[in-house]
Amino acid sequence: FDFNSNGFQSNKHVSYKYRIKPIDTTWRNVPLNTHFVVFNSLSSGDYTFELQGKNISSKDVQFASPITFTIAKPFWETYWFYSLVIATIIGLVWLYFRWRLQQKEAQRIAEVDKILIDKKITNLRLENLRSQMNPHFIFNALNSIQDYIISNEKELASSYLVKFSRLIRMYLDYSQQNEITLEEELNALKLYLELEKVRFEDELEYTISVDNQLKTKQIKVPSLFIQPYVENALKHGLLHKLNDRKLHIEAKIIQQNKLEITVEDNGIGRAQSEKLKRPNQQHKPFATKANEERVHLYKNKLKRDITITTNDLYDENDVAAGTKVVITMPIH
């Protein structure tokens, strides 16, 4: 507050006193020759400033008109700020619980999606099984058993029938599982090839080699996954070849802890096989299509990177010399 008095040399002859209610109950002196009062840290509230002046040579006191003023509360002490803070807290709590509900809903949807995927994989696996246990294969197997019986080769018939029943039992057992061990998969392949060798009248030479580093009893692979590619090699590559039919299956470890399985035949090749198909057979074998769909599901939904590549083989004269299928998958 600034103030002054009119008159000759009033600075030297007028003294002032002030008080500010409700803080002061008594008057405070203002130093002589000072014409202002400063309040640096008044708290919020209503105040009245009073000022009196007196000539040092007189007893009369003059009072200035009181000044009333209000200091507002800082914004952090106002009701609207408290309301804003409470509203913000409530909003954050609401957003948190909404986020949690969304997380749970997303988890529930993911679980449902996984169940549906598992169901689809199961259906594809069963379709794959039906394609493997096709009537043509069963018919040939039963025909072979009948030939043994007619030829009075009871021991061969009995042995073939035992192997055939074991293979049927394996297929039915493995078809109920998403994954089986590599050892189980290879055992089923061996049994299948033993029966197919009879169909080829022993004009089939096959080998199955396994890397010694592979723990076949622990490594898991999709159930009945390799057999369709072996069947394709026999049916489309080697069946139409008259002699020197060879099939090689190999399982080994490659870089980055991956399993590589190759199915290689020295058959007539894919191009020649396509030419020999009947007009109503111009499509991909069903078992192969089912396996490709399984690969898509494993890769995109179950995050298991399985890749399949098919290569045509040629001899030094650039003549078709077979087909090689390479399957790679992470070991787990």
Image (cartoon, rainbow, N blue to C red):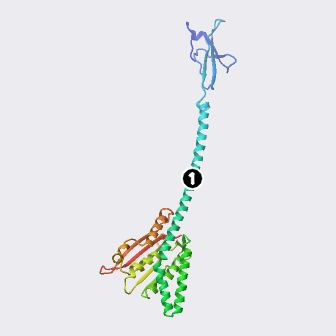
Residue linked to disc 1: 105
Which quadrant holds residue 66? Answer: top right
Judge whether 156 appears above or below 125 on screen. below
Number of other residues with Cα within 10 Å of mark 1, as a class: few under 14, some 14 to 19, many 20 or more: few
Residue at the bottom extreme? 152
Judge whether 34 appears above or below 227 on screen. above
Q: Residue at x 59, y 35 (%)?
A: 84
Which quadrant holds residue 177? Answer: bottom right
> As rendered, which of 215 and 187 lies closer to the eye?
187
**What amino acid type is highlighted by mark number 1?**
Glu
Quadrant (top left/top right/bottom left/bottom right) for the N terminus: top right
Q: Position of residue 75 (x, y in %)?
A: 58, 31
Q: Position of residue 198 (x, y in %)?
A: 46, 87
> As rendered, which of 212 and 18 lies closer to the eye?
212
Judge whether 49 appears above or below 231 on screen. above
Q: Residue at x 49, y 88 (%)?
A: 146
Q: Residue at x 56, y 79 (%)?
A: 169
Quadrant (top left/top right/bottom left/bottom right) for the C terminus: bottom right
Circle 1 sits in a helix, a strand or a loop, which is it? helix
Q: Residue at x 40, y 85 (%)?
A: 245
Residue 225 visible to an observer of this rendering:
no
Residue 76 visible to an observer of this rendering:
yes
Q: Position of residue 115 (x, y in %)?
A: 55, 62
Judge whether 149 appears above or below 173 on screen. below
